[in-house]
Amino acid sequence: MHVLCLASGGGQQAPVLAAAGARVTSFDLSEEQLRKDRAVAERDGLDIACIQGDMSDLSALAAESFDMVFHPVSNVFVPDVSAVWQACYRVLRRKGVLLAGFMNPCLFLFDHDEADHTGNLVVRYPLPYREPDSLTPADRVRWQQSGRAAEFSHSLEAQIGGQISTGFGITGFYEDRWSDEATVFNRFSPVAIATRAIKPGLCGD
Ligand SMILES: C[S@@+](CC[C@H](N)C(=O)[O-])C[C@H]1O[C@@H](n2cnc3c(N)ncnc32)[C@H](O)[C@@H]1O
């Protein structure tokens, strides 16, 4: 199976899939994240092709060249998620599978500094949340100084409806909790969503 690990660098998922026998391409914007994929591959004797680029533009990859796209929680970093679904659709073969993870947008309603410092959930931001537009002028300055990548909440319509309107059929769905078990959000709700979607065959099957 030829697997595209999309915005999935960091030496985690790509090496695991390569160790399981897949032919893996890791495509990520960060050279540092790709360096970690290469380092694990070298350490464990695995073969991973690493390509640097933006997940919204997969023109460097041939159409219909992958059996599976593994896309972990990372489309939070692009302003337009529909471009990612269309790019995934193009590079997948017929009956290819898209495994995607994303945050429940409700997570972005809350003041995360307040949650971290006091454990209280305070609703602060209308959705969709978009950095830096959703921030106050003072918070915008702090965000710029932090060097943190801009985050975008996206709606469930953009995440799930977007996959469907691109042509995928959704065949699997689950919700998950934050990996940091101490986070206050886990006391109230799962925070992440994963979908399994299929690009239809030629007859729509
Ligand atoms: C939260 S990490 C997810 C993958 C990581 N292996 C993990 O399990 O945490 C998000 C990844 O998305 C990548 N990324 C952010 N913006 C991107 C973009 N526009 N195009 C491609 N990759 C991007 C980051 O470099 C990072 O590797």
Image: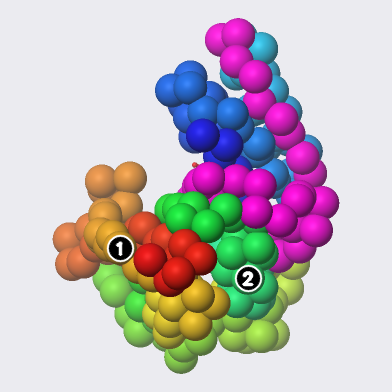
Which residue has dot 1 on it?
171
Residue 94 located left or right of residue 195: right
Give whichever of 162, 114 is nearer the camera: 162
Quarter of the C terminus within the rendering: bottom left
Residue 82, compared with residue 17, is above or below; it is below
Which residue, as the protein is rendered here, is positioned at the far bottom? 126
Q: Are marks 2 and 1 in contact (CB under 8 Å)?
A: no
Circle 1 residues within 10 Å: few <14, some 14–19, many ≥20: few
Q: Quadrant of residue 142?
A: bottom right
Distance between mark 2 and mark 1 Cα atoms: 18 Å
Residue 161 located left or right of residue 85: left
Task: For mark 1, give the secondary structure.
Answer: strand
Which residue has dot 2 on it?
86
Residue 20, compared with residue 14, is above or below; it is above
Circle 2 residues within 10 Å: few <14, some 14–19, many ≥20: some
Q: State the image coordinates of residue 172 (x, y, percent, origin top left).
A: 28, 60
> Magenta includes 65?
yes
> Magenta includes 75?
no
Task: For mark 2, give the secondary structure.
Answer: helix
Q: Quadrant of residue 35?
A: top right
The reply to whether residue 131 is in sight is no
Q: Which segment is the magenta one?
A: 44-72
Residue at the (27%, 70%) spot, across then down? 120
Q: State the image coordinates of residue 74 (x, y, percent, origin top left).
A: 55, 57
Residue at the (59%, 55%) spot, across then down? 92
Residue 21, compared with residue 121, is above or below; it is above
Give whichever of 203, 133 is nearer the camera: 203
Which amino acid type is shown beneath numbered disc 2? Answer: Gln
The reply to whether residue 62 is in sight is yes
Residue at the (47%, 62%) spot, across then down? 201
